[in-house]
Amino acid sequence: MTGVYVYDCVRTPRGKARPGGGLAGVTPLAMLETLLGALGRRTGLSGADDLIVGCATQHAEQGGNLARTAALTTGFDAPGMTLNRYCASGIDAVRTAAALVATGARAVVAGGVESVSRVPMFSDRGPLWSLPAGSLHMGVAADAVATAEGFSREELDRYGLRTQTLAAEAWAAGRYTRFLVPLNGLGHDEHVRPGLTLQALAALEPAFPEGHPLVPGVRHLHTRGTSPSLCDAAGLVLVGSGLPLEPLARVAGSATAAADPVTMLTAGQAAVEKVLAQAGLSAADVEVYEFAEAFAALCLKFQRDLGVGDDRFNVNGGTIAMGHAFGATGALLVAACAGEMHRRGARYGVAAVSGAAGSGSAILLERP
């Protein structure tokens, strides 16, 4: 995509998705209102050609086209659209914004929001959840991938320790403050656990011992320490062309992919492979990968299959350590990717997410 740029990003902290969590008392609408206000102060923007918000559970406080609602309550001049590709919704909001700019829009604000503590997963009672594959818990699917790929419990635990250690180091070094908008007295990602040890991870019980008829013989390997922590968060990204602002990155490409709904969480990797092929790049050409940690096994598979070392993969920690807010995660990863590209002077970066039912999306960024 020529001439389509990411100009700025704003995001809330990630609050634990439980009563008493740092953002549990903040409505999804209030999160978006806060970020729109912050983005306006940073950029001078009072409106856009559109406001596109990803949200995975569009029900109750997250229903009724939350993007349009936020535009109305804040006076932000934009039509407003809310979309859903499950956990990949935030990436797809940014991808959609880029497509609109490529076809004539000047500025589009895109991102995502999810309050898992206020609007629980599956509370929309969608028909997908009653299908055989839809009733398969993502954690069981991750255990199926770990079993098929031959990953050991120790390998998964070591990945869980790595992401927690890197997240704690990144927060201590201030690497996440550039785009952060503190909210409700919270100024950090609440799930990060400095000082975690491999021994503590090894002592955890399997998180998904129930199994599923679609995956006989699965080994129960993932625990709370190697699974994404659920959280409440929101993030917004300003995408445009010809704006009087210094761009962070050019949107160089994007892709979405579908995978087997039983091994559903492999679709994010497939989307990365697709966008790299479209751009004529190899995995070695990309210096920054921000890949949603939809369980440790999927990260190990990604690194092994694409030959991506620790020095380029989730180098500031990921969603296992910091939290997964479904529809918001993609926007947070785009912000993290752009920030790390600038920190290390990287030319290319990729942000990608796998979602339910075998969906996945990726976006390729190039530093201008």
Image (tube, grey):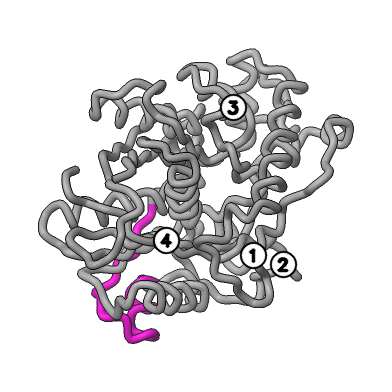
Dot 3, how many residues are within 10 Å of its Cα: few (below 14), some (14-19), or many (20+)? few
Per the rendering, the mark at residue 21 is 2
Q: Is label 1 in a helix, a strand or a loop?
A: loop
Task: Give amino acid for label 4.
Answer: Cys
Q: Are marks 1 and 3 in contact (CB under 8 Å)?
A: no
For residue 144, above or below residue 59: above
Q: CA distance from mark 1 to mark 3?
A: 32 Å
Q: CA distance from mark 2 to mark 1?
A: 8 Å
- Pick whichever of labels 2 and 4 is earlier in the sequence: 4
At horizontal 34% and vertical 21% (from top left) the residue drawn is: 282
Q: Is label 4 in a helix, a strand or a loop?
A: strand
Q: Are marks 2 and 1 in contact (CB under 8 Å)?
A: yes
Per the rendering, the mark at residue 59 is none
- Pick whichever of labels 1 and 3 is earlier in the sequence: 1
Q: Which residue is mark 3?
A: 310
- Pick whichever of labels 2 and 1 is earlier in the sequence: 2
Q: In this rendering, does residue 128 appear at all?
A: no
Q: Horizontal and vertical percent for residue 106?
A: 17, 64
Disc number lying in front (1 or 4): 4
Disc number lying in front (2 or 3): 3
Q: Is label 3 in a helix, a strand or a loop?
A: loop
Residue 368 in magenta? no
At horizontal 18% and vertical 57% (from top left) the residue drawn is: 101
Q: Horizontal and vertical percent for residue 241?
A: 19, 58
Residue range (magenta): 65-84
Task: Give amino acid for label 2.
Answer: Gly
Q: Which residue is mark 1?
A: 117
Residue 176 versus residue 219: which sits nearer the camera? 176
Task: Give amino acid for label 3.
Answer: Asp
Per the rendering, the mark at residue 9 is 4
Residue 32 versus residue 119: which sits nearer the camera? 32
